[in-house]
Amino acid sequence: MAVYTDVTEGELTAFLEAYPVGELLSYKGIAEGTENSNFLVHASTGSYILTLYEKRVDKADLPFFLGLMGHLARKGISCPLPVTAHDGTVIGTLAGRPAVIITFLEGLSLRRPTAAHCAEVGKALASLHLAGQDFQMRRPNALAIDGWRKLWAASRDRADEVEPGLAAEVDADFGDFERNWPAGLPQGIIHADLFPDNVFFLGEKLSGLIDFYFACDDLYAYDVATCLNAWCFEKDFSFNLTKGTAFLAGYQSVRPLEGEEKEALPMLARGSALRFMLTRLYDWLTIPDGGLVMKRDPTEYIRRMRFHRAIRSPSEYGLT
Ligand SMILES: Nc1ncnc2c1ncn2[C@@H]1O[C@H](COP(=O)(O)OP(=O)(O)O)[C@@H](O)[C@H]1O
Ligand SMILES: N[C@@H](CCOP(=O)(O)O)C(=O)O
């Protein structure tokens, strides 16, 4: 459920007067999503998404996220374009929240992506990395190792309630990451949350990328590792080598990985699995049941952490 803040017709009509979108025809809340309140808005000039930013998004980051979407859209990446108001601004206020209107993207997110879809995602991720290279704004990754430590400090004491032995397992991982996290790999703008719910398809063809609210500067290969975790595992937690091969070949058809990036993939994939395990674990332990925020199962990512720990060669992901 992702409508935390309600908006009346009167409030929305007044808000839209500031934007060149025409008259309000209809609107409804969107159930999907996690962080913010989203509405589908039909106006006389077309369809739009209205987003009201809730408290987990740092308002100081909005110019980066919205500037990045505009930059990528202008460079031919199919992603939402923030609509500029008549006075030249992008971020307004609605129902006491920072709010924006972005363009609507056609397509559906997939529950069961195929290898062909994974190849498309690989190409799109590499294209995003290249298109971001001349974006001028910077945002350090708030969910890099220091951010993981904060989440872990808040969750560690109750971690064994979720899986016995988890506290000791993750403590050992932190030591390993601090000693072996790769340095000096190519870096730039990454999406950092390119999960299947954030990618739209029309049939086999990728039609758009959304949800840039974790985007930041970090290693390109870390974004690759995140997609391997999000797209190439089956429901029984087995790694699908056909999907991994397709995803990596798609990525490398646009941006070939350097040798050191390939070598670092097992460590990066473990780190990315830990990052998503930790945000899920934190929510699992702190958000009351039956609340508005959808809690996701941290154990899905404990399984992935263990899989990557056992990897002996990056070729096991399907690298050719
Ligand atoms: N530009 C867009 N075009 C079409 N649908 C969108 C667009 N942006 C968001 N949505 C819809 O809203 C949902 C939530 O958006 P998302 O950005 O993932 O929210 P959150 O940041 O809260 O997770 C998506 O799953 C999708 O259904
Ligand atoms: N992809 C993350 C959760 C973030 O949710 P989103 O709706 O903002 O994509 C996870 O699976 O843990």
Image: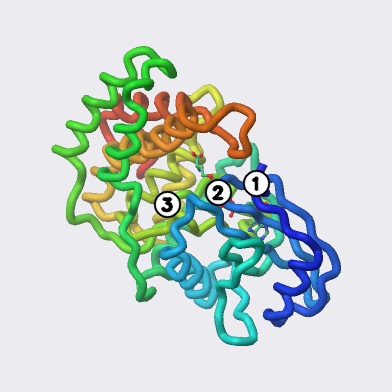
**At label 1, which amino acid type do we have?**
Ala
State whether residue 130 is above or below residue 231. Answer: below
Q: Is residue 253 visible?
A: no
Task: State the residue at coordinates (17%, 39%).
Answer: 178
Where does the N terminus fall, quadrant-wise?
A: top right
Disc 1 + disc 2, Cβ < 8 Å: yes
User: Under 8 Å from ligand 1: the CB of mark 1?
Assistant: yes
User: Under 8 Å from ligand 2: the CB of mark 3?
Assistant: no
The percent coordinates of residue 83 (x first, y second) are 62, 76
Rendered image quadrant of residue 291: top right
The percent coordinates of residue 222 (x first, y second) are 34, 48
Q: Which residue is mark 3?
A: 192
Where does the C terminus fall, quadrant-wise?
A: top left
The percent coordinates of residue 312 (x first, y second) are 26, 29
Residue 2: which numbered mark, if any?
Answer: 1
Q: Nearer the observer, disc 1 or disc 3?
A: 1
Graded by Cα atoms within 10 Å as few (under 14), some (14 to 19) or many (20 or more), the crowding at tag 3 reads many
Nearest the viewer among 229 and 315 is 229
State whether residue 239 is above or below residue 217. Answer: above
| Distance between mark 3 and mark 2 Cα atoms | 15 Å
Task: State the residue at coordinates (55%, 29%).
Answer: 288
Considering the numbered disc 1 on the image, is that residue within a helix, a strand or a loop?
loop
**Seen in the image, is 96 located left or right of residue 23?**
left
User: Under 8 Å from ligand 1: the CB of mark 2?
Assistant: yes
Graded by Cα atoms within 10 Å as few (under 14), some (14 to 19) or many (20 or more), the crowding at tag 2 reads many
Q: Which residue is mark 2?
A: 35
Q: Earlier in the sequence, mark 1 or mark 3?
A: 1
**At label 3, which amino acid type do we have?**
Ala
